[in-house]
Image (tube, rainbow, N blue to C red):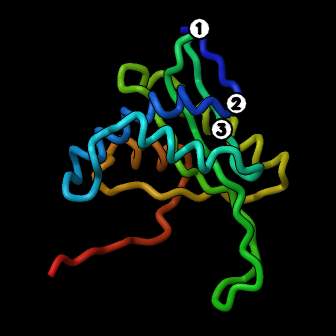
Amino acid sequence: MDLLIKKEKNIEIIAQLQNEIQNLHNKCYPDLFKPYDYNLIYDLYKNIINCETIHCFIAYDLSTPVGFAIIAEQIIKDHPLFYDHKEIFIDTIVVLNEYQSKGIGKKLMEEIKTLSCELKYNKITLNVWNKNYNAIEFYKKMGFKELFNNFELYI
């Protein structure tokens, strides 16, 4: 494998690769997540991705896109409950199933950490669905600690 990580905002590639995680979420939470629809995903990211505080990395095996990460700079200031702070939030990180466990997620995370340091951020946060077992294990392996739990009750 000839891995290359590029910092680029290619909505077409990101919308295509989103298929992987959208289908997993739809399978695990069919009452919540819609099936993958390229056009809906494309429109969603088109409206988000061009903000200057949003950064994207795309992983390639030669010229084939195999994963991506979208991160957002977040600044919390003058909040009534929280101290002022800033953090990098990982909105999405995806590696195609057939390319998982080959170091691609780790390389994407290294790029995120490098950019975070360059931008003078010292904290990275993310959310993960509790049935995404592989992602949870990956994040723990990368040194992330669980911060909170989210519960729901249907009535």
Going 36% across and 20% down the picture, which residue do you hit? 98
Q: Quadrant of residue 114?
A: top right
Q: Secondary structure at mark 2?
A: loop
User: Where does label 2 land, which residue?
Assistant: 8
Left or right, 140 with reference to 117: left
For badge 2, the amino acid type reads: Glu
For badge 1, the amino acid type reads: Leu
Going 29% across and 38% down the picture, which residue do you hit? 23
Image quadrant where one finds the C terminus: bottom left
Q: Nearer the viewer, residue 42 or 76?
A: 42
**Is the residue marked by circle 1 packed among few (<14), some (14-19), or many (20+) residues within 10 Å?**
few
The mark that comes first in sequence, 2 or 3, is 2
C-alpha gap between disc 2 and disc 3? 6 Å
The residue positioned farthest toward the left in the image shown: 155
The mark that comes first in sequence, 3 or 1, is 3
Residues at circles 2 and 3 in contact by the CB criterion of under 8 Å:
yes
